Image (spheres, grey):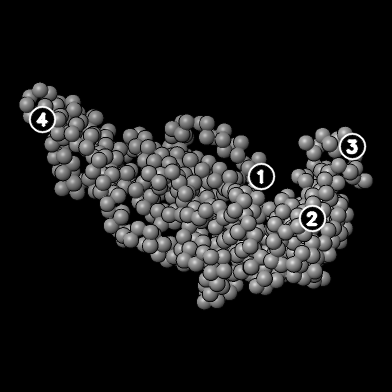
Amino acid sequence: MLTLDHLCKTYPNGTQALDHVSLCVNAGEIVALVGGSGCGKTTLLRLICGLEMPSAGAVAIDGETIAAPHPAVGIVFQEPRLLPWLTVAQNIAFGLDHLPKGERDQRVDEALLRVGLSGYGPRWPRELSGGQAQRVAIVRALVANPKALLLDEPFSALDALTRASLQDHLLALWDAHRPTLVLVTHDVEEAVALADRAIVLQPRPGRIFADIPLDLPRPRDRLSPEFAEAKRVVLNALDGSLTQPNPAGGNKATQAAGWW
Amino acid sequence: MSEAGTLETASTHDLTARTPGARLFSLFGSSFAVGIILPLVTAIAYEGAFRAGLVQGRLLPPPSKILATLWELARSGELLTHVIATLARVLAGFGLGALIGMWLGALTGASRAARRLLDPTLQALRAIPSLAWVPLFILWLGIFESSKVALIAVGVFFPVYLGVMAAIANVDRKIVEVGRAFRLSRLSLVRRVLLPAILPDFIIAIRSGLGLGFMFVVAAEIMGASEGLGYLLVDGQQLGKPAQILAAIIAFAVLGKLGDWLIVIGARPFLSWQDSHSRTQ
């Protein structure tokens, strides 16, 4: 279980990015963090994976506090961030240095097969399309079998068709080992298509505005009325998070100015 | 890096289905053949004009005479002595300058504090024309090899220092973060992320460093040497032998080009991943 306990983050320049965010994510659960820009989604993710330290509060996975990048937590960034001087196979094996070569190669081959890129191992990252590169980035984080995988708007730079296909790929990958997924997105449809729960964040400072369960059966039909209804609920909450005054924030005028 | 090498050659095999050797040869062959046209035609035309009596060729000797001089120098073993003397100076000065430049560049590139402390001084020193050091070096180090090597090292130092510092300071933060997310130790972060990331810029820095090394060896040898290609230049001037001057110039050109080419060829297997404009041409 992933627990966030009263997380606060204030940057050195005085920006208060997060204000007492507490959240429990069960093992194997898929949670989508939704919110307008500047609501601290990315900061939250960076705190969970230990790339940044909270100003107050703590992150723990299965009771173990995360104070630095942790082997149980993997991360996929908004861009693929593949290392251009390593082949696709070497990129996937980047975090598997501790394994013997035989097992490493086997895991890489399996991973490539699962994302439909078998045979792409010896290629260079520059030879991949955006969607292929992001698939490689996802399996690079997943081959180490993390307990939790964090994704920071992983599909936002892709066209709608590629995005939908990658969302399916992600679900298939998740199904194999069922790690906890925490997905940051600004795309409500993506949240409803993937997540068990949508957490709507409110900006300035970032705090949890709503916690919406999404218990639609899987596989989800994006055209069903239930799907549309769930989308409407999340959108409503998102609207509210941006228009309702933040109890911890400053006056409304500066908030509105800041949002735009 | 060793496994990187094997995988990488495997991939280029797949993509081009030609051996690296054959590809290299044809690439070198074709570009060389086109590049040689202009100098070759000029040389033949001048030689023809000389043979026809249209030019005297006293101050600018015809190619045949230059080649004959070169051949004479080579046959007597004199050329080799001079080439070795010059190369030894360049290598010593280049090694020294590149090594110091590399370390200081790495230091100032990686640490903001070191950059604020050292860089202003080094930039101020860079503003001094390197040849201005010559009298001081001769006073300090004598007129023999040490002062020459020191001058060459100063010339090589600055491009290498600047190149390495800029390369390290400009490494993509996002890529470094990948290394951090995978919990690399400081040492493996340097080895697996920083070094490969700066390699292309590093090669360029080394190449311009070597170029300056050859420039300064000429200066050092002109100012006083009893052997070396620069000595051949001065000797040719004083004794009125333009063919010998041109022969030395050609030897310089060949050595400089060869050195640069060795760096390029040596680095190529490590840079085949680059997504650069020149690759697509």
Chain letter of the residue beneath label 2 in the structure image: A
Q: CA distance from mark 4 to mark 2?
A: 90 Å
Q: Secondary structure at mark 1?
A: helix
Q: Amino acid at mark 1?
A: Arg
Q: Which residue is under mark 2?
A: A229
Q: Point out residue A209 in the picture as x, y percentages from the top left corner.
A: 86, 52
Among numbered discs 2 and 3, the one appearing first in the sequence: 2
Q: Residue at x 60, y 39 (%)?
A: B119
Q: Nearer the viewer, residue A135 or B148?
A: A135
Q: Which mark is residue B112?
A: 1
Q: Are marks 2 and 1 in contact (CB under 8 Å)?
A: no
Q: Amino acid at mark 4?
A: Gly
Tell me if mark 1 has few (under 14), some (14-19) or many (20+) residues whose alpha carbon lies within 10 angstroms of its own: few
Q: Is residue A187 above or below residue B148?
A: below
Q: Is residue B187 visible?
A: no
User: Does residue B56 appear left or right of residue A88 in this picture?
Assistant: left
